[in-house]
Amino acid sequence: MVEMEWDEILEEYGWVMEFLKGMVKPAAALAVVLMAVALSYAQKLSLEGEMIYSIFRAFLQLSVIGFVLQFIFDQKNAGWIILAYLFMVIVAGYTAGARAKHVPRGKYVAGVSILVGTAITMLLLVVLNVFPFTPRYIIPVAGMMVGNAMTVTGVTMKRLRDDIRMQRSLVETALALGATPRQATQEQVKRALGIALSPVLDSCKTVGLISLPGAMTGMIMGGASPLEAIQLQIIVMNMLLGASTLSSLLSTFLSWPSFFTRAYQLQLSPLSPD
């Protein structure tokens, strides 16, 4: 009787033991963090506390999300995919908006831009049968796209605002000559988009030459052939470029009207010094 109860307990909570066994190697990798902490202490950088806090937070967040994803994968319900995707977009929009804190309604603009840009890209991938609409595929793909779109959108909005503020006289001159706000800020928009998208473009140009990206590395370490890993990585680079471009471009369309009045005059409050 006791043996049967023990077998039932092992069957029900066996995943906990498997998880703990799997954490042995990640725990051993903490030696690298300890080395960084020791170097920080030796050089008097005063970063030891932040390093320990950061790695602890990463460990906690990844552990929690691992259990959450396992739960979602087991449900096989499209509703959980949408819920997880919206959660990622909300967090990304808040983070990108906080980076561009001087842009009016920045968090809303960033959230909508990321949502639309990544949703269109994901829809195309599903329609073209590149990825099946299942949690195991869509949630990781959405996470990569939302993360990149978050970074690009935040930089675009911040750079656009900073350029308009620094080149205020040029913008006002263009407005005085009859240009629309969009025409008056065309160069600033181009510069903001160019700077924000340059890391993505550089990554596409150098992928495989300098480093092996995460998706490709993960597949190879998981036992897949390099040719299969390359195919997936090409898809990933395509979708990241598409989603980032759509999101950043949309963020300029949504944010630049906030810098102008209905009379086509510059708003002074968003352009006030930091």
Image (cartoon, rainbow, N blue to C red):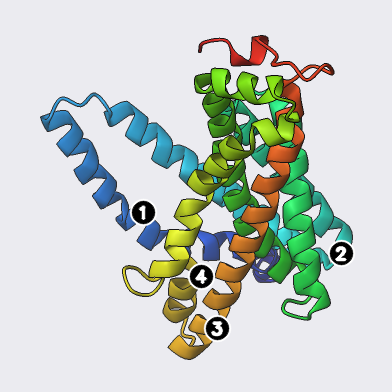
Question: Counting residues from the N terminus, which is met first, the one under dot 3 or under dot 1?
Answer: 1
Mark 3 vs mark 4: which is more N-terminal? 4
Whichever of labels 2 and 1 marks the residue nearer the N terminus, that label is 1
What residue is pinned by disc 4?
Answer: 215
Q: Residue at x 62, y 49 (%)?
A: 149
- Which one is in front, 105 or 140? 105
Q: Is residue 48 above or below residue 226?
A: above
Foreground mark, 4 or 2? 4
N-term-proximal mark, 4 vs 1 = 1
Q: Amino acid at mark 3?
A: Gln
Numbered tag placed on residue 231 in the rendering: 3
Please name the residue that numbered disc 2 is placed on.
Answer: 77
Q: Nearer the viewer, mark 3 or mark 4?
A: 3
Neighbour class for label 2 at 10 Å: few (<14), some, many (≥20)? few
- Which element is circle 2 on? loop
On the picture, is 118 further left or further right than 50?
right
Q: Which residue is mark 1?
A: 27
Q: Nearer the viewer, mark 2 or mark 1?
A: 2
Give the mark nearer the N terminus: 2 vs 3: 2
Of circles 3 and 1, the one toward us is 3
